[in-house]
Image: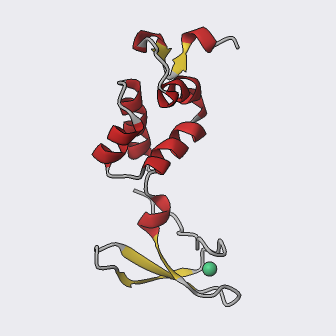
Amino acid sequence: MVLEPVPCPNCGSINVVRHGKTAQKKQRYQCQNKLCCRRTFIQEYTYQGYLPKVKQQITDMAMNGSGMRDTARVLKISRNTVTQELKKNSPITVCERKILRGDQLNPNRCQLGTYTRSRNG
Ligand SMILES: [Zn+2]
């Protein structure tokens, strides 16, 4: 696993240092940018819901007809995260959007995340 620089969510600087852990055992960071207000932040807070594994799970659950609420509950993420992820993830957008809207659709027509009827516009 490659460790990527953790950008400060406040100023975008990657000049950050580890700054202990939270009560939930999450890594806390502190921004070292002097122009920034040097606030501390938690990586998980920024990244939660955007890990490839979580993305895949969101997609899988939606494809299986799970509602946003169920997906959020099972994956222990917020419903907003689920919604954002599904909106952002363009290959599945058409199909997922229908699911999120509550449209009746045939799961068999969701292929590779694209609802076949809408494929050509
Ligand atoms: Zn900063």
Question: Of 35 and 4, which appears nearest the observer?
Answer: 35
Question: Of 13 and 100, which appears nearest the observer?
Answer: 100
In this picture the colour scheme is: secondary structure
63 vs 4: above or below: above
Q: Quadrant of the N terminus?
A: bottom left
* Image coordinates for residue 60, horizontal then vertical, percent: 38, 30
Task: Determine the quadrant in which ligand 1 lies.
Answer: bottom right
37 vs 76: above or below: below
98 vs 90: above or below: above
Based on the displayed image, in which of its 4 quarters is residue 97 positioned? Answer: top right
Number of marks in picture = 0
* Image coordinates for residue 36, horizontal then vertical, percent: 66, 85
Judged from this view, the residue extending furthest toward the bottom is: 34
99 vs 21: above or below: above
- In the displayed structure, does residue 107 sit left or right of residue 121? left
Q: Quadrant of the C terminus?
A: top right
Which residue is pictured at 49% across the width and 49% down the height?
Answer: 80
* Image coordinates for residue 26, horizontal then vertical, percent: 34, 72
Which residue is pictured at 28% across the width and 44% down the height?
Answer: 74
Question: Of 1 and 18, which appears nearest the observer?
Answer: 18
Based on the displayed image, in which of its 4 quarters is residue 67 positioned? Answer: top left
Which residue is pictured at 49% across the width and 20% down the height?
Answer: 103
Which residue is pictured at 46% across the width and 16% down the height?
Answer: 104
